[in-house]
Image (cartoon, rainbow, N blue to C red):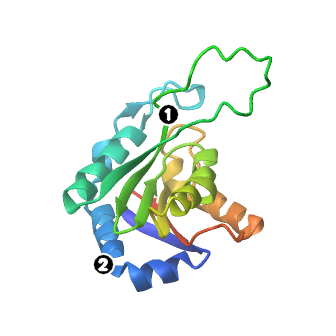
Amino acid sequence: MRIAAKYSFNNGLEVVTKNYSHLLKEIETSISNIDASQSRTKISKEKTMTGKTLYSPVNLNNSFKEELLPLGWKNLKVDCDYSNAYYSSDYNLRSNIKGAYRDMDFVKERLGVEVQFGKYSFMVYNVCAKMTIFHNLDLIDCGIEIVPVKALSAEMSTGVSYFEQFVWDLENRGVSNIDIPVLIIGIDA
């Protein structure tokens, strides 16, 4: 795979380059080591592309794990203890919510990385909510979000979001005082 584009959200490129250049190099090398053709295994059942062989998000995610986990990157899970204090007093709470958690794909030296080949809402959630939560929990200082560019998403199932769409929305949303620096990396096969 290759890096096709980078976008600096809230000075993400500058912060990552200054404080985590060695980790950015690991990410960049890992991306270039992934042979995307090995992940072109999903046979589409969608009406608009029945029978077409597409890139499998599951296989691509596994390729990132194979590259990054041996380098000391870790998946980080945080248990969620949900309160029942907000239910009305006459509501019969039928079950407790146990086992809930949030996780970040990869964390190393307080740099969080998410690899996203899913729907648009997950990209926005990762950068505008999850990374902020992990920062507020004092687990990361900044992040990297790896997403496909339009050309790659066109070779995946319909509905997979892409770099160009994501950047447009972030630019038009603007930066909030709770946002952390995030480098958005657009990749292609």
Residue name at image x 68 percent, y 64 percent: 170
Residue 22 image label: 2
| Residue 121 in view in this figure | yes
The furthest residue to the left: 70
Amino acid type for the residue under numbered disc 1? Ala
Is 45 located above or below residue 10 in the figure?
above
Query: Where is residue 167 shown, x and y percent of the image?
Result: 64, 65
Residue name at image x 35 percent, y 80 percent: 21
Residue name at image x 45 percent, y 30 percent: 99
Q: Residues within 10 Å of mark 2 (few under 14, many from 20)?
A: few
Query: Where is residue 10 shown, x and y percent of the image?
Result: 62, 75
SS class, disc 1? loop
Query: Where is residue 185 shown, x and y percent of the image?
Result: 48, 66
According to the image, label 1 marks what residue? 100
Label 2 with label 1: CB-CB less than 8 Å:
no
Q: Quadrant of the N terminus?
A: bottom left
Residue name at image x 59 percent, y 17 percent: 95
Left or right relative to 170: residue 142:
left
Query: Which one is in front, 89 or 78?
Result: 89
Is 105 located above or below residue 58 in the figure?
below
Left or right relative to 120: residue 31:
left
Q: Residues within 10 Å of mark 1 (few under 14, many from 20)?
A: few
SS class, disc 2? helix
Query: Which one is in front, 69 or 150?
Result: 69
Q: Quadrant of residue 43?
A: top left
Amino acid type for the residue under numbered disc 2? His
Disc 2 or disc 1, which is closer to the eye?
Answer: 1
Left or right relative to 24: residue 185:
right
The CA span between labels 2 and 1 is 33 Å
Question: Which callout, 2 or 1, points at the residue further toward the start of the chain?
Answer: 2
Is 45 located above or below residue 86 in the figure?
above
Q: Quadrant of the C terminus?
A: bottom left
